[in-house]
Image (cartoon, coloured by chain):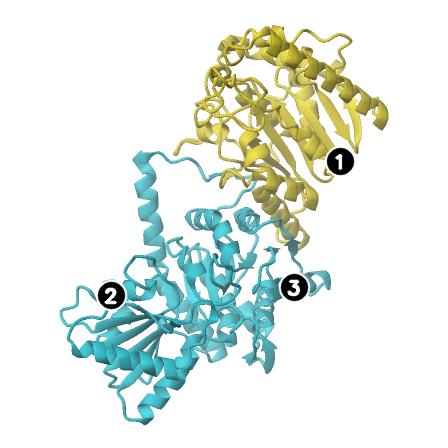
Chain colours: A yellow, B cyan
């Protein structure tokens, strides 16, 4: 957050790429993230959405919340459609059939559309080096279809397909680290963000859009409906995810890791869990197991920062 | 007039893409489509075609890339076969529904399992109802001409539909044929630049691919059906104008020696040329047999087909795909439907032949006609038969 000093809330652009009147649930942090990203990008952007909550809530025909050009084709292919948009613009501008100007290409998808069904398309697009920004708004399950688990669902969370049963107490696997997968493609910019830190998120979106080549931002998006949390706690939950070290904010710029908000001391993970119904069944042992892993992962991240000289 | 040269049909297809000055090519290699993409990447890397070549990681992404670039107003091309087609089929349907005029060449190949790289029409029949205009090419010249015609027709503002040019894998894609190239000047006269009325452009924002609730979904589908039907006069106009420029005229159903024919063979694609040999042989022996070649599969040319078919007593339809446990081959099923309301209609005999490039020689067509005649004597329409099964 190097430019925090100039980010008074008043200075945030007034433009809304993602306008009011959409049908997202109360307290939807995903809608907030998309709105903030729109403010950071400005008007000269083409948005490609995957199937998912944001597509459904924003475009019930004949209405649309989008004040910028927007396209949705299918679930798993936002990165591929964005590749097409970018290639098309590039060819048309080079061939003089369109005036030369900067048009950002934004691909938007949820955790399912990114780290499960969309992982092949995004890997292809990152590897080919298209000049676009991919934002994954991760609410940690298939919320649009009714809270089914995804590979981004955290260990222990209860969803409709990883219920807290008598034998298996919720999600049995650890959350897939999609930001690390994106970073492994050696792309110029990878970051994690959360709309509870709006200026940080906007700054990262700007950076990601401006780098030449692919950029990936993984946004934690609190989902009161799926997380069984109070809608007015969405901002606080996002902060708790960061403060506990469960969802650390960092950037990977040309391979160099840089933690955005360094926390000398992490809050206990329990502070985050107790506000969410999806973790209500966690036992003390389970919480300890998670705490151990979170602490270890956070240390690993700091080590990556030291090793890559991003500090 | 262009000069006539011998070239592999895949190269002819690539030449047409180059002549059409395509902006974006997105393709994933699959046998027997590979020669087309290889030639296209050579064109791009040698500076002979100013286009983006997007070497996608799957056919699904190939069609997604084409859809995205068509939405910003770029002319796009892809080609595939078989498994590649059914992998991309989800997006094939989207492209048509979004009215984006992508052009795709299919080097037709059988579907797995068992895996077969050889030719039949089972791949394209799996997406019969995808809403694309669908041509079937009979030879290399057809392929080259129809790539150009496809852009012209698909991009017409009164059409705005994607177009498939089917060419048989190997038996067309990999053979060297005499092909007359069209010169660039003629192509430019025939094919104006792609200028869709609506594109993704920040100065005029639009929403494409919105969610439509049941209250409007039926209407969108009705509109799509009407759009495909309404493309017919523009398809005919496209052929007429192409013919006026090149001397090569095409028709939805092409007739070969049908004068007074009591029996008509019906074929689609490359085997039509073999069927012509068979018809010649039968005619020489005084048999009253002609041939109908289906060039246009969607929109289905009902009027032209009835006009051609009703003259006959019997149709012998050679399908190259199968509907398991269904009414036989897809072509015969549709032809029967097209004739159902006719008070006096020919008997339709249906053979499924040439699966996975199993050879269909002239004598096979004669055999099919003989068998159909035999069955016909009983007065009932024969059941479909998978022809040439080894026992």
Do marks 2 and 1 both belong to one polypeptide chain? no
Q: Which residue is mark 2?
A: B336
Tell me which corner region of the image, top left, top right, bottom left or bottom right, holds residue A5.
top right
Of all chains, the one bearing label 2 is: B
For the C terminus of chain B, the quadrant is bottom left
Q: Are marks 2 and 3 in contact (CB under 8 Å)?
A: no
Of all chains, the one bearing label 1 is: A
- The residue closer to the viewer here, A70 or B42, is B42
The answer to whether residue A8 of the structure is visible from this angle is: no
* Side of B95 relative to A254 (left or right): left
The answer to whether residue A11 of the structure is visible from this angle is: yes
Give above or below for B294 relative to A281: below
- Name the residue: 49% across, 55% down: B85
Q: Which residue is mark 3?
A: B38
- Name the residue: 59% across, 60% down: B22
- The residue closer to the viewer here, B297 or B111, is B111
Q: Are marks 2 and 1 in contact (CB under 8 Å)?
A: no
Give above or below for B84 relative to B356: above
Q: Secondary structure at mark 1?
A: loop
For the N terminus of chain B, the quadrant is bottom right
Residue most toward the front?
A: B391
């Amino acid at each position: 957050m190097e430019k925090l000093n100039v980010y008074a809330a008043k200075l945030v652009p007034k433009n809304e790429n993602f306008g009011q009147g959409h049908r997202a649930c109360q307290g939807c942090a995903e809608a907030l993230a998309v709105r903030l990203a729109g403010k950071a990008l400005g008007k000269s952007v083409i948005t490609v959405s995957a199937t998912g909550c944001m597509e459904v809530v924003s475009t019930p025909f004949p209405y649309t919340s989008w004040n910028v050009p927007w396209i949705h084709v299918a679930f798993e292919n936002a990165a591929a459609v964005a590749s097409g948009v970018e290639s098309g613009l590039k060819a048309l501008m080079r061939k003089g059939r369109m005036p030369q100007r900067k048009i950002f290409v934004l691909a938007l998808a949820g955790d399912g559309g990114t780290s499960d069904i969309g992982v092949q398309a995004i890997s292809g697009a990152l590897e080919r080096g298209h000049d676009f920004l991919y934002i994954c708004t991760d609410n940690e399950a298939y919320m649009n279809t009714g809270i089914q688990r995804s590979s981004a669902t955290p260990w222990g969370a209860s969803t409709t397909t990883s219920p807290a049963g008598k034998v298996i107490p919720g999600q049995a696997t650890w959350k897939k680290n999609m930001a690390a997968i994106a970073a492994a493609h050696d792309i110029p910019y990878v970051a994690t963000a959360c709309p509870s830190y709006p200026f940080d998120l906007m700054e990262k979106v700007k950076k990601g859009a401006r780098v030449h080549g692919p950029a990936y931002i993984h946004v934690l998006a609190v989902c009161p409906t799926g997380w069984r949390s109070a809608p007015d706690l969405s901002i606080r939950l996002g902060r708790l995810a960061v403060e506990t070290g469960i969802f650390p904010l960092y950037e990977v710029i040309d391979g160099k890791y840089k933690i955005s908000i360094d926390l000398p001391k992490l809050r206990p993970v329990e502070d985050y869990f107790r506000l969410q119904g999806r973790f209500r069944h966690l036992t003390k042992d389970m919480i300890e197991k998670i705490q151990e892993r979170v602490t270890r992962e956070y240390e690993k991240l700091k080590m990556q920062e030291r090793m890559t000289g991003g500090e | 007039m262009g000069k006539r040269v011998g070239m592999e049909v895949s190269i002819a297809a690539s030449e047409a893409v180059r002549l059409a000055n395509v902006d974006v090519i997105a393709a994933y290699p699959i046998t027997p489509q590979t020669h087309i993409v290889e030639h296209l990447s050579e064109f791009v890397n040698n500076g002979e075609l100013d286009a983006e070549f997007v070497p996608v990681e799957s056919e699904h992404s190939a069609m997604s890339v084409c859809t995205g670039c068509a939405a910003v107003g770029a002319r796009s091309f892809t080609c595939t076969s078989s498994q590649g087609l059914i992998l991309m089929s989800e997006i094939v349907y989207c492209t048509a529904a979004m009215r984006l005029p992508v052009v795709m060449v299919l080097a037709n190949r059988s579907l797995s399992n068992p895996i077969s790289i050889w030719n039949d029409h089972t791949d394209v029949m799996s997406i019969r109802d995808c809403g694309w205009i669908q041509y079937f090419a009979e030879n290399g010249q057809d392929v080259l001409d129809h790539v150009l015609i496809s852009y012209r027709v698909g991009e017409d503002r009164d059409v705005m539909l994607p177009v498939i040019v089917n060419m048989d894998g190997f038996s067309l894609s990999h053979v060297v044929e005499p092909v007359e190239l069209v010169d660039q000047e003629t192509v430019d006269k025939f094919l104006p630049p792609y200028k869709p009325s609506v594109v993704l452009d920040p100065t005029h924002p639009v929403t494409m691919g919105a969610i439509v609730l049941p209250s409007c979904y039926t209407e969108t589908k009705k509109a799509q059906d009407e759009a495909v039907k309404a493309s017919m006069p523009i398809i005919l106009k496209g052929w007429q104008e192409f013919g006026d420029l090149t001397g090569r005229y095409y028709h939805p159903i092409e007739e070969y020696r049908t004068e007074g024919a009591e029996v008509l063979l019906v074929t689609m694609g490359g085997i039509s040329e073999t069927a012509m040999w068979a018809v010649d042989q039968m005619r020489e022996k005084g048999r009253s047999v002609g041939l109908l070649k289906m060039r246009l599969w969607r929109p289905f040319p009902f009027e032209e087909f009835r006009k051609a078919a009703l003259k006959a007593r019997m149709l012998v339809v050679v399908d190259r795909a199968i509907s398991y446990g269904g009414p036989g081959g897809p072509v015969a099923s549709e032809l029967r439907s097209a004739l159902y309301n006719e008070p006096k209609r020919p008997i339709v005999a249906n053979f499924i032949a040439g699966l996975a490039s199993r050879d269909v020689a002239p004598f096979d067509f004669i055999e099919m006609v003989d068998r159909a005649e035999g069955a016909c004597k009983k007065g009932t329409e024969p059941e479909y038969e998978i022809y040439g099964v080894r026992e």
